[in-house]
Amino acid sequence: MKNPFNARAPTFDADAINETIRRALASAGLDTTTGPMHGVTEIIRRALAAGRHAEVDPKFDADSVIDVEARVVPASEDTNAAWNREPSRSVIDVAARVVPAAEDTNATLEREPPISEAPQRPGSFEAHVFTNDAGSRAYKVYVPAGKSDAPRAMIVMLHGCTQSADDFAAGTRMNRLADEHGFLVVYPEQAAQANASKCWNWFKPQDQLRGAGEPSLIAGIVREVARTHGADPRRIFVAGLSAGAAMAVVLGETYPELFAGVGAHSGLPYGSAHDIPSALAAMKGGRSGMPGLKNGRAAAAKPRGKAAQAVPIIVFHGDRDQTVQPANGAHIVQQAHDAHVAQADDAGLRVSSQSGVTSGGRRFSRTVHSDTEGQARIESWTVHGAGHAWSGGHASGSFTDGDGPDASAEMVRFFMALPRAGSE
């Protein structure tokens, strides 16, 4: 095989390229005669002029690197919010990519999307704080662009340990689905003061009860956003990863009238722990339960770990998860099944299963529990070979597995297919 670095540079019209770049910047409203953009165009001009007659040099020197952007977005800032604040600069993203002199620049320009095809401006992503008697929590709300003729559905996303709202939004790409389907997305954020690892405290007795602790904070956030943005109170759903999934299950049990459906990815069943040692045991597949807990309220009862509310639920779990053992996903499904059967007028739910392989090579098994009318009430996905990570997630977020089936898309499909729940 020939060494690609020994190829000679093709000829090109540097003046024409410079003029094309100048027109592109001018059309974006950027002044190339003075200020920072003048320096950018000068660097491009010198780089192209130097490449007219020179041989290829595989090394990059200080004069050939373009390290200027039209706008700077801090690493912790969600790009959707930046787009919303600076619409005038969203038309162009000045190339920070290095184009070696040997590369066919005309071909490069053809591969890059024309300026007129810049992506449509997304919705707003704003930060807020909610406070009640249980404390305060920050949260972010994503509102998709465009108006809605009807009240929007809402999906509440609860991050896992060590994660943030921005991290979880990037990894799950739920905001993109919100743009596509027109629903609101709310990202409550755990405070480091409440848990050093920023885990939701799903295992503490006071955080597994209605009207107390973190469930009351999250429910308060949901009501505040629903009121502010006119959300449909019968189409509010909650989903989470790991500790966030365990808290989502808690919310489905303690606020069944508020949440029409639950999504649990790599989570734990309701009432499976009452302190840190029992939480660690539950994560490894053991069960100690929480003393004195019944139907989401404190009660004089034996340890149970039993859910009573038949809220529709979709469960994802990797069968190689070493952080939260897969048995926990099976326990969530069993709890939900028992609750649905207890509340059903008929003999129970009908079960169907299927399996497949994603384009990324991940095998999966999917089981659906449907009522007599064919409506799915419980859906369970086992992702074979996957660990403790959001299936189908994007690498820009932590704890993601891009090879698995798209958990975000499947949860949205499941939620949107559910009949509207009763509102408060």
Image (cartoon, helix red, strand yellow):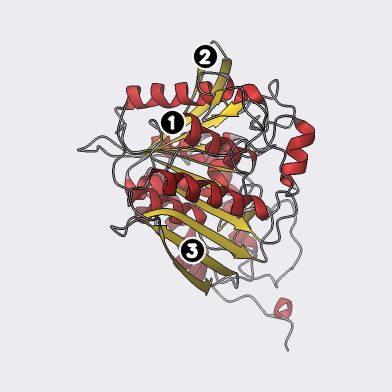
- Tag 1 residue: 85
Which x, y percent locates residue 203? Answer: 67, 32
Residue 13 in the image: above or below residue 2: above
* Real-space CA distance between mark 2 and mark 1, rounded to the nearest whole angstrom: 26 Å
Of the numbered discs 2 and 3, the one sitting upstream in the chain is 2
**What amino acid is found at the position of numbered circle 1 in the picture?**
Arg
Figure quadrant of the C terminus: top left
Q: Give the farthest residue toward the bottom.
A: 1
Which x, y percent locates residue 376? Answer: 37, 56
Check disc 3 and report its element: helix, strand or loop: strand
Tell whether 71 sits left or right of 175: right
Of the numbered discs 3 and 1, the one sitting upstream in the chain is 1
Is 411 in front, or is 353?
A: 353
Check disc 1 and report its element: helix, strand or loop: helix
Q: Are marks 2 and 3 in contact (CB under 8 Å)?
A: no
Q: Identify the residue at horizontal 51%, vertical 23% (top origin).
A: 210
**What amino acid is found at the position of numbered circle 3 in the picture?**
Thr
**What amino acid is found at the position of numbered circle 2 in the picture?**
Thr
Q: Give the farthest residue toward the left.
A: 149
Which label belongs to residue 131? 2
